[in-house]
Each structure stands twice: as structure tokens, then as C-alpha cells.
Image (cartoon, rainbow, N blue to C red):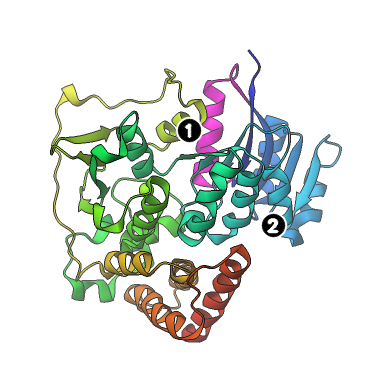
Amino acid sequence: MLRKKIAILGSTGSIGKQTLEVVRQFPEEFSVVALAAGSQVELLAEQVREWKPQYVAIGDSRLEDALRNALAGMDVTVFSGTQGLVELATLPEADIVVSAVVGAVGIEPTMAAVRAGKRIALANKETLVAAGSIIMPALAKHRAELIPVDSEHSAIFQCLEGRKSGDVARIILTASGGPFRNYRPEQLEEVSVADALKHPNWNMGGKITIDSATMFNKGLEIIEAHWLFGMAYERIAVVIHPESIVHSMVELADGSVIAQLGLCDMKLPIQLALTYPERRGSTFPKLDVTMGMQLHFQPVNHRLFPAVELAYQAGMIGGSLPAAINAANEVAVAAFLQGRIKFTRIIGIVSEIFGYHQKESFSKTPDLHEILAVDAWARERARVLLA
Ligand code: MG
């Protein structure tokens, strides 16, 4: 069997590393043709020595020389910067592009992979949030394929398999609620970076862990689901499910609810995105409900988590607004992680940019160029708010 060649954008992050673990399980089926990272030169070089890809890229172009030095004597082509990520996303040799960089930096390479007609295993939710209106029509045009890796969207994708869209009443996204789900809103004023980084179920990168604590992550996922599944916002619901075992649900017209269950392990959705429509056995740990377990569900407290309503509103207004609030959130989360602002200020900044953007720079039908310009505008505006 000819092995499928995979390009991994974001190979040193949490999803990238787990993708390599999946590939390690199926050496007959997959090989790694390209690896790209943002700034972790040492780990990237180590990965290149092990996986021997033909191509490698470093997102921060100032680190290109350091990467070249680390790879001296190896037969590998080195790229850098956003253009380097775009090169890797469009390699003629690559069958599958895993888009797992964090943040809006994923927009251009993911769009390039779509235009190149690739199968894209999409873990970068910010791309659909900011540019879903451009990505989705381009998919059909270029015969590209987008398979979600986000656990909720992978669950919905599986629950929807083989169903007529008219039979689907609602999508129900589950949310763990993060470390603060039982707090009173006033208590959020005092939480530390360490508190916010303690996710009860998932072990993820810093940015998404903070997004889970504010539930802005669920907001991004609402918008992501809207684009991926062509679902009106009124038909996307959210429920808190502290155990993170039910990864999401689909309610059908007759009231039947279909759920997908599994361990809190991203390797399962990653594997499915690589092997789909096939299923493969693996040695990864599996959920065994026969051992007994308790599952809980509770409604979202919108006073505690205003980010969810904010995302619904941004999604419904649409245009360039989701790109603006996503960029503002990225800047605010980085400032929080650096200890520069309080936890509650993150969504405060997002909310202020929401308002400013509508007054100052909103576009109803932005093209890719405008979306990138709005992203830059919102970052600058958020930095001014921080100063
Ligand atoms: Mg998720």
C-alpha cells in the first residue's frame, strides 16, 4: 500500500506531537513529508532527525538561521515565515495537511491548502472563525476536504454521518466549563494564571486552556460549528458537561439525541481525520463505560461566562466581527499569561473591541485581504487598550 504523506503545521504543539504519536501507530499507512513549528527550534530539529521529512519550516523567520544550523548536514529543505507555512501547506507530495498552529496565523496556510485541494485535518479553529465565509465556498470549488480535529466538531461530524440535513434539529456542543465552572462571578476577579491553567480534564496548550477557562473557546467553537456544518446559530446549543466524556451531540427532528463518547484524548479525533472514512484499531487507551461512570450536564451560567453570548452575537452579525474579536482575544490572553491583566479583563477587552470594530472598521463581506487587515487592526487596538 502506498503510504499517505502528511504535512504537519504546528508539529511542536500539543496537537502536532499527538499527531506524530498517531503516525507512529500506523507506519505502514502514513509518512511525514513536512513539519512546521512557530518558534521551538530545538524540538523541531529533534522531530526532523526522527521523522526525516523532506521539508521543514519555522514560522518565526528570525529563527531560520538557527534552524539551518541545527539541521546542518541533513537532506531537508528549509522554509520560514508565513510564506514557509504556505509552501508546506501546498506541497504537491502532501496528501493530508494537519493544520494545528495556534491562532490567526493559521488562516493563510489553511486557505492555501484549500486552494491546493488537500485533505485538511483542521485543529486550528481560529481559521474558520475569522475566515469561514471564504474557506467554506472555496472547499467545494477546489475539491478540498476539511475534517475537524476539534473534539466537539469531530463528535458532531461522526453523529451527522449519513444523515439528511433536514433530519437535524440542533447541534449541542458540550463544554467542560473549565476550572471555574462552579465559581461565583465575583470570584473570577481574583484568579491567578496558575488557577486558569489548571484544566480539570484536558492537557492542552496555554492559549486554549485560558480560552477554556473564560469559555471563549466554546464561543469560537460555536462559530466554527456554524461554518463547518452550515448550521444557523439558533440551532447551536451549549451545555456544561464536567466529565468531557460526551464530546458533543446532535438532536434529530424526532427528538432522538445522538452522542459521541470517548476519553479526553485528542489522538482519537486526530486519527479519524487521518484515516476517514476508514476506522483503525490502535493501542491507545479506550473508554470502557461498562466499568461504570457518572455523567453530568448543567446549563451555562452566562453571568459567569459572558464570552459565550458575545460569540453568538458576533457570529450572528458576522462579516469581519468574528475575526476582530478573535484577534482581540489572542492579544488579551497573551497579556494575561504574562501577568499584565486580570482574568476578567480578557473578555472585557474582547467586548470593547467588539464595540469599536462595529463603529470603526466593520466589513459585512470581507475578502481574505480585509480579514487579515481586520485581524491586524484588532491586535493594534487591543494593545492600545492594554497600554
Ligand atoms: Mg474543543
Q: Depth check: give the residue in front, 81 or 255.
A: 255
Residue 294, numbered circle? none
Say if 242 sits above or below 207 in the image: above
Instruction: Give how far across and how far down residue 118 sits, in percent.
Output: 61, 37
Residue 82, numbered circle? 2
Specify which label sits upstream in the sequence, 1 or 2. 2
The residue segment tinted magenta is 12-30
Query: Which amino acid type is marked by label 2?
Result: Thr
Q: Is residue 363 among the parts visible in the rendering? A: yes
Say if 7 sits above or below 109 in the image: above
Instruction: Give how far across and how far down residue 190 sits, in percent.
Output: 27, 75
Q: Which residue is mark 1?
A: 273
Magenta-span inclusion, residue 28: yes
Q: Residue at x 20, y 47 (%)?
A: 241
Q: Residue at x 81, y 48 (%)?
A: 68
Which quadrant of the figure contains the N terminus?
top right
Left or right of 189? Residue 98 is right
Q: Depth check: give the residue in front, 8 or 254.
A: 254
Say if 181 sits above or below 303 in the image: above
Q: Is residue 247 among the parts visible in the rendering? A: no
Residue farthest toward the top in the current orientation of the protein: 1
In space, the residues marked 1 and 2 are separated at their CA atoms by: 24 Å
Q: Main secondary structure of the magenta part?
A: helix
